[in-house]
Every structure is written in structure tokens, then in C-alpha cells.
Amino acid sequence: MFTEESLQLLHQTVQQAQSIFICVSAQVKLDQAASALALAEGLKQLGKEVLLLSPAPPTEDLTNLNGVEHFTQQIGNQNLQVAFAYQPDAVDKVSYNIDEETQKFYLVVQPKKGTPPLDSQTVEFSYTGAHVDLIITIGLTNLASLDGLYEGFTDIFNETNIASIHAFDTDYGTIHLNTSGAAAFSEATTKLLTQLGVTLTPEMANNLLAGLETATDHFKSSTMTAETFDTVAQLLRAGGHRMATNKTTEVIPVTENSAPILENITAPKNRLLINRKNHKITSAIEAIQPQAIH
């Protein structure tokens, strides 16, 4: 998994950083999104300003993750911008004043005489400009997959330290955190948060457990290791909960014609029981109820 050198380098960089971006692709998988959300909360716990960036809004399969609404498609985080519907010659003067008693800043837009005042319902607020000390990418093969987030801010990406978390060493980045050997990004992120001295909250544990369970097909994947199960136990102790699953029972229709054929089925002892009288199949392990005979 991670090398000691890469962990130490990231730890030092995080300590020196105040503003951090965490980036994922538009095709982000649940495991990667869960890791990004947990890492963001962990960094905030360390007193950092964190912005979660994705080129596209989260897909429906991510909506159950805690904090998924914090993903944004806007990289600006520095300058507050005020916009409103404008008509030519409608504005006469723009000024501001500060109320010393209430410590409030007032922006005043004065219309020209004979024109109606601006409609407050059309006012929009957003941020432009960006300042960042560290960029962390999760599962991002190349920066171009960030689409407009990268294309419009190439200078920021070129001038800022980038920590790339991926299953291989990417061609970009000053810090490479290789997750190979881990069953999922969520397993590697859990270790990373522990190394950074972050205390796992139930919300973080829930996200990471969901990511790990999804990536390993409910812990049935051959990539599961003893260390992975240790991570699962750590997340459960931190307050995480298993994903809810819809259990269905298979129904095998039985008819008078099919019963003799079923009698010849070779099955483990006590596994499959056939009642010749009513042609019903029952099991000592799973209750399998047949459909009504027509």
C-alpha cells in the first residue's frame, strides 16, 4: 500500500496547508466518493478549509453517502461575486458603507431616476478566484478528466502540490499514494486518516464502510485480506453500519410432472427435502415455498 516516504511527505504537506481541494472525476465510483467525503471531514477536523470538487453532480447511487451534497462543480473559493438581472441605463451608482454598530457591510446599487429599483429576487451569489495550498485527487487517471475544472484553472494545478491517490503511480502529482494491495480506496483512506491522526466519526465510518462493502461485493471479493477485515472491524467500532440489503427468497414452481424429476436430484444430506404427497420442496437451511399447483 502506501510507502512510509509518501505518508510522511503528505503529512508534512497537510500540516503546512490551510486550503485543500479534493477532486474526483465525473464517473466517480461510490468507493472513491466515500473516500473523498471521509477525507474531507478528516481534514476539516484538523482545521483545514476543504473544497470537494467534481465535474458533474453526484449520481443517484451516491445519494446515500453522508455529505454528498457538499460536492461542487465550481472551483472558486475566494471572491464573493454578486450578480443580478440588468437592464441598460438602469444603474446610476454603486457604493458601499459599513455599519460600525452592527459590523455589517452594505452594498448599495442606486437606480437612475425614473427607472424601477433592481429586483432582489434575481440576485445571485457565487465565488470566483481560487487559493489552494494542496490538491488531492482520488482515482483520477489524468487531470484532463476534470474537464472544465482543470481547463479553466491550469495555472493553479501547475503551481500547487498535488497528492494523487490511485491504484498505480499517475503521470502527474508531486506525491503518489499507491493503493495497490488494498481491497478498496476506502480501506486505504481509513489507513491514511489514522496516519494523519484523525478520529473517525460515525459519519466517516459509515461512508468508508459503504465504499469498502460496495467495492468488494459485500466482502466476498478475493481481494479481501486479513488487513481488510481489520479495517472493517475498525470502522464498525467507530460507529459505522453495514449497508442494507434486499434479501429475496427463490421460489421454485413444482407440478405433478416436475416432482418425479426433482426426486432424482442429488443434493447434500438435509439440504433438499421433497414431499412426495403434496409435491412441495422444503429445505433445512432455506425455506423455499413453491407456488400453488394449478
Image: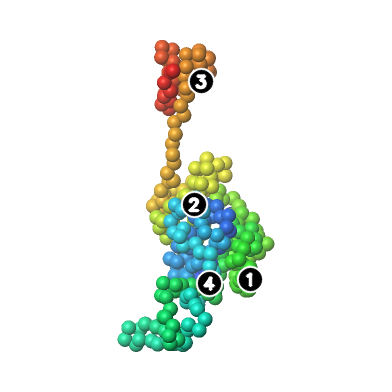
Residue highlighted by disc 1: 154
SS state under label 1: helix
Q: Is residue 177 visible?
A: no
- What is the distance, in whole Å, between disc 4 and disc 1 at their CAs? 13 Å
Give percent across and percent down for residue 289. Answer: 41, 24
Colour scheme shown: rainbow
Give percent across and percent down for residue 54. Answer: 55, 61
Indicate which label's residue lies in the foreground, 3 or 2. Answer: 2
Vertical order, 167 against 96 (above or below): above
Indicate which label's residue lies in the foreground, 3 or 1. Answer: 1
Q: Identify the residue at horizontal 35%, vertical 83% (top origin).
A: 103
Q: Earlier in the sequence, mark 4 or mark 1?
A: 4
Give percent across and percent down for residue 221. Answer: 55, 42
Q: Identify the residue at horizontal 47%, vertical 13% (top origin).
A: 256
Q: Earlier in the sequence, mark 3 or mark 1?
A: 1
Q: Amino acid at mark 4?
A: Gly
Q: Are marks 2 and 1 in contact (CB under 8 Å)?
A: no
Q: Earlier in the sequence, mark 2 or mark 1?
A: 2
Q: Which mark is residue 76?
A: 4
Q: Amino acid at mark 1?
A: Thr
SS state under label 2: helix
Q: Are marks 4 and 2 in contact (CB under 8 Å)?
A: no
Residue highlighted by disc 3: 267
Q: Earlier in the sequence, mark 4 or mark 2?
A: 2
Give percent across and percent down for residue 266. Answer: 53, 18
Nearest the camera: 93 or 114?
A: 114
Question: Badge 3, how many Cα within 10 Å: few under 14, some, many 20+?
Answer: few
Nearest the camera: 224 or 56?
A: 56
Image quarter where the C terminus lies is top left
